[in-house]
Amino acid sequence: MDTMAAESSSRTSRLTRYATPRRKDTGLKQERAVRTRGQVLDAAAEAFATRGFPAVTVMDVAELAGVTKGAVYFHFANKEALAQAVAEEFYHLLGVIGQEVQEADLSPLDAVSQLLVRTALAFRDDTMVQAGARLQIERSLIGADLPMPYLGYTESLVTWFQQAREEGQLPTKTDPDVTARVLVSAFFGAQHISWVLHDRADIAERVQEILDTVVPRPLK
């Protein structure tokens, strides 16, 4: 998948995220509740991404969502619950990206590259992803258990590096675990620096630099 296709996929996922509930619901009232919950979650993501957890209030989220404060509390017990739901959605979206790359039937090293490129575009373009990343930085300020970061992402890379080594694309001395850890550290560090310095406008270029530098080239 090229960059343009990945950008289109990212935009489509944002538009359709709440079009269909993950759990089957029947009846107008339930459908309305699902839509309202999605509105609230998107509003919370926007607030957390732009202002950070400490500065955001439940009323801020209600106003952004265009609903009453009571409607927010109907779906989420407090601001911590909102943060937890946004963080969970963030990791759900990263999982979707990984699954789509897995299903693309790419070579292992191409899969590694596509995972990072598509994740970079999500960090640049998707507010939910941006919010989840900021909440993980602020996790010590949030009185709720958030998903543990980086583990699943690293596991996916380890698997692809192992496959590449087994298929003779990498030297046998290559350590998949070490390579994956270095790549994850470089990627998430680059996205943070790109956010601080350039609001992630240059993240695609920075990630391509990482791929060119860190990911081994297939053996001939």
Image (cartoon, rainbow, N blue to C red):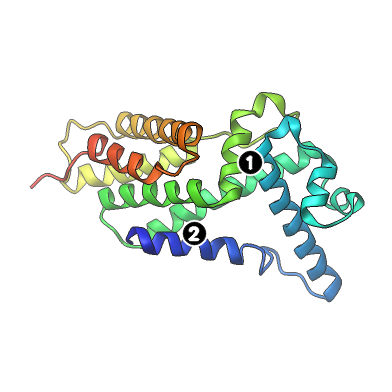
Judge whether 28 appears above or below 144 on screen. Answer: below
Q: Residue at x 61, y 49 (%)?
A: 128
Q: Residue at x 54, y 34 (%)?
A: 149
x and y percentages locating residue 85 in the rendered image: 70, 45
x and y percentages locating residue 207 in the rendered image: 35, 41
Does residue 144 appear in this view?
Answer: no
Q: Residue at x 63, y 35 (%)?
A: 135
Does residue 207 appear in this view?
Answer: yes
Q: Is residue 156 left or right of residue 68?
A: left
Judge whether 39 appears above or below 119 on screen. Answer: below
Which of these two is toward me, 90 or 58? 58
x and y percentages locating residue 69 in the rendered image: 89, 49
Q: Residue at x 85, y 57 (%)?
A: 67
Amino acid type of the residue tagged 2 in the rendering: Ser
x and y percentages locating residue 136 in the rendered image: 60, 33
Q: Is residue 15 left or right of residue 44?
A: left
Residue matched to label 1 = 49
Instruction: Check disc 2: other Cα within 10 Å, few if <14, some if 14-19, many if 20+.
Output: many
Which of these two is toward me, 216 or 121? 121
Q: Is residue 147 left or right of residue 69?
A: left
Query: How far apart, in angstroms, are the residues tagged by discs 1 and 2?
Result: 17 Å
**Furthest-front residue in this view:** 198
Amino acid type of the residue tagged 1 in the rendering: Ala
**Furthest-right residue in this view:** 70
Residue 10: mark in rendering: 2
